Image: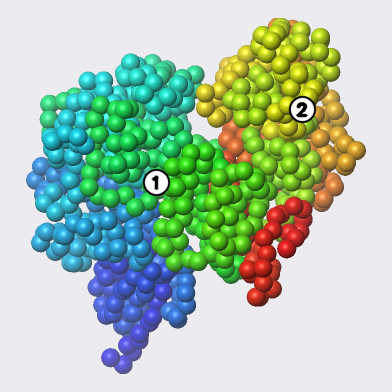
Amino acid sequence: MKDCKTLSIRVYGIVQGVGFRPTVSRHADKNHIRGSVCNKGPYVEIWAQGSESELEGFLYDLEHNPPKRSSILKIIESEHVQGEIFVSPDIAICPECKRELFDKNNRRYLHPFINCTCCGPRLTILDSMPYDRVRTSMGEFPMCPECEYEYTHAETRRYDAQPVCCNECGPEVYLIGRDERGRAAITYTRQVIHDGGVAAIKGIGGFHLCCDASNQEAVERLRKLKTRPAKPFAVMMRDMETTERECEITKVQKEVLDGHQKPIILLKRKPNGMVCGAVAPDNPKVGVMLPYAPLQLLIFTYDDDIVMPDCLVMTSGNTSGAPICRDDNDAITELSKMCDVILSHNRMIRIRADDSVMDFFEEKPYMIRRSRGYAPLPFMVSKGFKGEVLAVGGELKNTFCIGKNDLFYQSPYIGDMEDLRTVKALKESITRMETLLETKPTIVACDMHPKYNTTYVAQEIGIPVLQVQHHYAHILSCMAENDYSDPVIGVSFDGTGYGIDATIWGGELLEVTYDGFERLGSIKPFVQIGGDMSAKEGWRIAVSMIYSIYKDKVKAAEVVRQLKLCDKKNCDVQFMMADNKINSITSTSAGRLFDAVSAILNIRKQSSFEGEASTTLEFAAEAYEEKCAVRNSGSKISDVDSIELSNLVYENSDGQLILATDVLVKKIIEETLAGKDAAMLAYFFHEKLSDMIAAGCIQASRNTGIKTIALSGGVYQNQLLLKMSLERLRKLGFKVLIHSLLPPNDGGIALGQAVAAMRHINKLKKGEENNYVCRFTSKSCKD
């Protein structure tokens, strides 16, 4: 034809495994376009031929009517480059597949692995890119004629759906160690749960341990089996109606809870719900998710006579400290003693993916654990970076990050690196992700702590190592998530981080740029006695602080006695260790400060899991605030004489800003001994600490001229502290950066490490890439 034109188009974004090619085919048919569409790994390439008006209509549909689960970042004319790769996360079952699952007239009726172009496993079954069936663990299952027809014909909703299968040709469920398979295996598992037992169930990214969440005895038994005395369990609820019965939930939370990611969301529990107290002891919230895999839906609803509970504990299937189990050998070794039955299947999991966990703040997601449904969607940093880097992340709540030019791919959650099984999982996952993303990093970033297992992993890789200070990485991660590159004042509050002075940092004020950082100040340093035990036993920190505050053994011992923190023998031992610097180190840990206050107020003297004492302190303060019915009013409601603002922050002899947390702790001790309410004092503590943070930022801004604040670190999972800090800083006119889809805790620092590494290699002269090992120790990184 005379006006016929041919376009070569490249589409970048989440366009693999989301039905993009079938959609392109349909748009082409609609607009009378001839041509082809093909996966090229980093992008989808389209050759389109038609008239100018036909091509305009095609491009419009391509941009404005993409598949439901896709995310187009850019559409450009094709030319040969080695581009970026976008791997789709796993996608929860869609409404159409859910309807078919329970349609007795559908050939996929009750099929545990039903999926289509809009839903199903993606990352967890993927061997390599581009995303095609032969490169997934579904390649082991030849399609039957009916499935193959759907897969190859554009008019079907399973056209080019890589995991497509049915009851005739797909994977099969079975019980490990028993003869039941298929229907019999599902019915047996349902009966075990119904009768109060515990089942291990293989999901999309690993195994779960499951029991009836309304059965106190069953939940307490699971706690004993898993050696998890108090840490909250997640609950999978049958549907939104059940969720609304049990919890308070907003419209925005509903949309995310029932969206295509289906994360665990922390929701406030309603009184008199069916979920028993043992699910989340002394916690006003419960982590709720809806079924996202067809097998999970079948556990709730099946064509047998068993009446199942509508709330099930669904917690990660692993032993303490180990990664989530992903295959039968793992399950037999680690889970067989924790459950009464193991329901597995023969679709292999290539990459583990725990459930994502999020809270909400100001009606926006506030991520606690970023994994299934979100990883490995990249964060984009608009700096024009070039290069490939790896960051191995933190020692706790580990995730790693691969940077490729301006894109930074954060991995699914791995776990705590204290366990060698988790270290092995980290190494395996790095290798697989590097293969998927077709990267060969030239530098690996890690924490500065010399004894972390992540540090050893980085050093074993065989490429140059960049050690990035922990709290600097926290603030960089917040900047990168917000795609912000101007200087900031970073408020980095967490439990533990190795400082450049070989002390423990954790309550820091930093001046931060992509080129480095300067420590501006911290909370008042204290002696942290007891090593690792002090992180679990806040009373030790409290005793140490009391000794430091009163500086008199007799007086300090009397205060310890009155507060009932420990007996005389233990008190004397703590004083002796402090005097002789035995197993003691200088610390500015904000996390340990919270633990100490929790112990002083007799809210929690020790913790059975990380953060138990500090979160219980937060819950007490929030309960007091709610009781006073002044939430978000900005009123001062604590019945304590104010500490003068001028006494909150001062400059020491080294020019460092010091937040006078010792003054605050002394005030709380005095008010406690005077008989004041513990919950009110918990609120007062948050209030005054927020005042100190604001005052510190004011002085830091005067010293640096910087008007932007970034808040990061695990302590900022505390929403009361976050709210109070934001209220004060915004009122003072600061621009404030906070997290949303990246955790503020150590699960997010790999992004900061990766950005530091990328910035570093982009500063080096060409040819010097392999000639350095360095540490960020000040504003400049020394080669």
Q: How is the image coloured?
A: rainbow
Image quadrant where residue 640 sits: top right
Q: Relative to residue 235, is residue 640 depicted above or below?
A: above
The numbered mark at residue 353 is 1
**Residue 429 is at least partly visible in this image:** yes
**Residue 487 is at least partly visible in this image:** no
Q: Amino acid at mark 1?
A: Ala
Q: Is tag 2's residue or tag 1's residue first in the polypeptide sequence?
A: 1
What residue is drawn where x is 77% and y is 55%? 779
The single residue placed furthest to the right in the displayed view is 653
Q: For this view, does 182 lie left or right of residue 723?
A: left
User: In front here: 55 or 340?
Assistant: 340
What residue is drawn where x is 32% and y is 33%? 335
User: In front here: 93 or 554?
Assistant: 554
The numbered mark at residue 581 is 2
Estimate the x, y position of residue 565 in percent, counting from the top left. 66, 12
Estimate the x, y position of residue 346 in percent, counting from the top left. 22, 47
Residues at discs 2 and 1 in contact (Cβ within 8 Å): no
What residue is drawn where x is 61% and y is 22%? 537
User: In front here: 307 or 155?
Assistant: 307
Estimate the x, y position of residue 709 in percent, counting from the top left. 71, 46
Q: Amino acid at mark 2?
A: Lys
Q: Relative to residue 239, is residue 456 depicted above or below?
A: below
Say what secondary structure mark 1 lies in: loop
